[in-house]
Amino acid sequence: MENTTYRVRVHKTEVRKNAAGKVTSYRVQWSTDGKPWKRTFQRSAQADAYRSKLLTAAREGEPFSLATGEPVKWSRVERPEMTWYDFACKFADFKWKAASAKYRQDIARALTAATPAMLTSGKGKPSDLDLRTAMRRWGFNTKQRAEASEETAEVLAWLAKNTRPVSALTEAATVRALLDSATSRLNGKTAATSTIRRHKTILQNAMDYAVELKLLDSNPIKALKWKPPRVTYEVDRRSVVNHTQARRLLAAVEAQQPSGKRLVAFFAVIYYAGLRPEEVVRLRKDNVILPELDR
């Protein structure tokens, strides 16, 4: 049988930890005709079960595929394959009809941010700006995709040929890279907390859709022990209203007739007490404790 081998060696499972030492994964390693293969699992029981199946197949004399590294009979019922870009377009189309305009934009942004982690080649690669623009405005836009210019169509064609298959997301490292890419800004820094939460949710929904299409057996994001990095903010003092500016603004508000007196109280409480507008509206006399006035 062509492209197969009976020369199979299954190695000991490797226990791995991330740089922080907090996340443990289990890597099954084996070789077919001298070619190394590996597959990573989040739980030791999963790794042991997979390794046991490899050993059983090798001992029973099953031929192993040189293309997949697994026993030939495992792939006789082949799972449909699809590149990441084609799948991302299909997911955007799936969500398009029921999604609001804003949610459509959120989906496009999340998929655009995640895609760099799924690129396979740099040969002939368009600029990062061209790739992002083509994906966000055309590729992941169901209504506009077919109307892309010839130049943009070439960029999208490059993506279709140079993104990894969805099945690559069975590797924990690939899923982690996907999430890291989707939750980072262009300068490499961590995105805002709201963006992280939104993009992760969208990608989780996309993985559920991949399971529905039978491209994956289970949602790899839900199985991954991944926590977004903490985001810290430093307030730019130049963007904050200082005391002198606040007094001038409040004086200008007070001069507005006929509601100036009430509005100045409204905005003054927001500025000096740090209340939200809805909290100010509900403010009552018994909620306030004022110091005695000097007489």
Image (cartoon, helix red, strand yellow):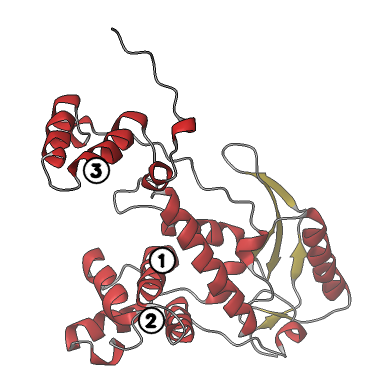
> Tag 2 or tag 1, which sits nearer the N-term?
1
At 69% from the left and 76% from the top, the residue drawn is 217
Towards the viewer: 34 or 189: 189
At 85% from the left and 65% from the top, the residue drawn is 52
Q: How far apart are marks 2 and 3 (CA)?
A: 60 Å
Side of 84 where 131 appears, left or right? left
Q: Nearer the viewer, mark 2 or mark 3?
A: 3
Please tell me how crowded label 2 is: few (under 14), some (14-19), or many (20+) other residues with Cα within 10 Å.
some
What amino acid does circle 3 point to?
A: Leu
Displayed quadrant of residue 218: bottom right
285 relative to 29, above or below: above
Cβ–Cβ under 8 Å for marks 1 and 3: no
Tell me where residue 140 appears, x and y as whole percent: 36, 79
Residue topped by disc 1: 110
At 82% from the left and 58% from the top, the residue drawn is 45
Q: Is residue 180 visible?
A: no
Displayed quadrant of residue 214: bottom right
What amino acid does circle 2 point to?
A: Lys
Tell me where residue 221 appears, x and y as whole percent: 60, 62
Tell me where residue 245 appears, x and y as whole percent: 14, 31
Residue topped by disc 2: 161
> Tag 3 or tag 1, which sits nearer the N-term?
1
